[in-house]
Image (spheres, grey):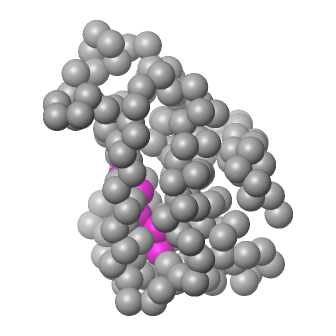
């Protein structure tokens, strides 16, 4: 498993962010029964940068807490069966790992939302990572049923990692 973490924000989180992200990525992989070694890229940035990325890729001119850029297009979330025959472009030719995609997290939002929701920055970072990992597995929350399923999965991943409220 390769987890590339880049920290580009000037503001520093006073928590072991690499450890938290790694643990949640691994818990998410196990939870969704991903049969492959995988590669995930994580960028930690600030509100200004994530706003620019949000504007460029989603045409939304506001900062957001997390953005997900999946590399795999699933017909059904976490259905990896098609990858053997049709997913050649989804694997890193050098490592053979499944390239799940990229996650962008705003350090400013981690701080703001931890305070707003009355939990730790550790829990907020873990939550945003789990949420984004589910997007990398093809889940979404546009419909009520999808939102409920995603929330359930997020809470279960966080509980497995010890990041409960």
Q: Nearer the viewer, residue 116 or 11?
A: 11
Q: Nearer the viewer, residue 157 or 115?
A: 157
- Is residue 154 rendered magenta in the image? no
Q: Is residue 51 among what the camera can see?
A: no
Q: Quadrant of the C terminus?
A: bottom right
The mark tally for this picture is 0
The quarter holding residue 52 reads bottom left
- Residue sitting at 69 percent across and 44 percent down? 157
Q: 101 left or right of 26?
A: left
Q: 51 left or right of 85?
A: right
- Residue sitting at 40 percent across and 31 percent down? 37
Residue 74 in the image, given as x and y percentages of width and height: 42, 27
Q: Is residue 115 among what the camera can see?
A: yes
Residue 23 in the image, given as x and y percentages of width and height: 58, 52
- Residue sitting at 41 percent across and 71 percent down? 44
Q: Residue furthest top?
A: 85
Q: Residue furthest left?
A: 94
Q: Is residue 111 above or below residue 73?
A: below
Q: Is residue 82 above or below residue 17?
A: above
The quarter holding residue 47 reads bottom left
Q: Is residue 27 above or below residue 165?
A: above
The quarter holding residue 32 reads top right
Predominant secondary structure, magenta span: strand
Residue 84 in the image, given as x and y percentages of width and height: 32, 13
Q: 117 left or right of 8?
A: right
Q: Is residue 4 above or below residue 109?
A: above
Q: Quadrant of the N terminus?
A: top left
Image: magenta residue range: 102-106
Residue 90 in the image, given as x and y percentages of width and height: 27, 30
């Amino acid at each position: 498993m390769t987890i590339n973490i880049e920290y580009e924000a000037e503001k520093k989180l006073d928590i072991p962010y690499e450890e938290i992200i790694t643990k949640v990525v691994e818990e998410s992989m196990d939870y969704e029964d991903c049969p492959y070694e995988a590669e995930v890229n994580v960028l930690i940035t600030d509100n200004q940068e994530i706003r620019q990325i949000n504007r460029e890729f989603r045409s939304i001119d506001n900062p957001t807490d997390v953005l997900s850029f999946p590399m795999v297009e699933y017909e059904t979330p976490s259905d990896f069966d098609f990858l053997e025959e049709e997913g050649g472009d989804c694997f890193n030719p050098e490592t053979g790992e499944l390239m799940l995609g990229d996650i962008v997290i705003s350090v400013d939002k981690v701080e703001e939302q931890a305070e707003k929701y009355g939990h730790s920055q550790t829990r907020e970072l873990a939550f945003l990572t789990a949420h984004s990992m589910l997007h990398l597995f093809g889940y979404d929350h546009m419909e009520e049923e999808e939102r409920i399923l995603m929330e359930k999965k997020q809470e279960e991943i966080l509980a497995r990692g010890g990041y409960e409220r």
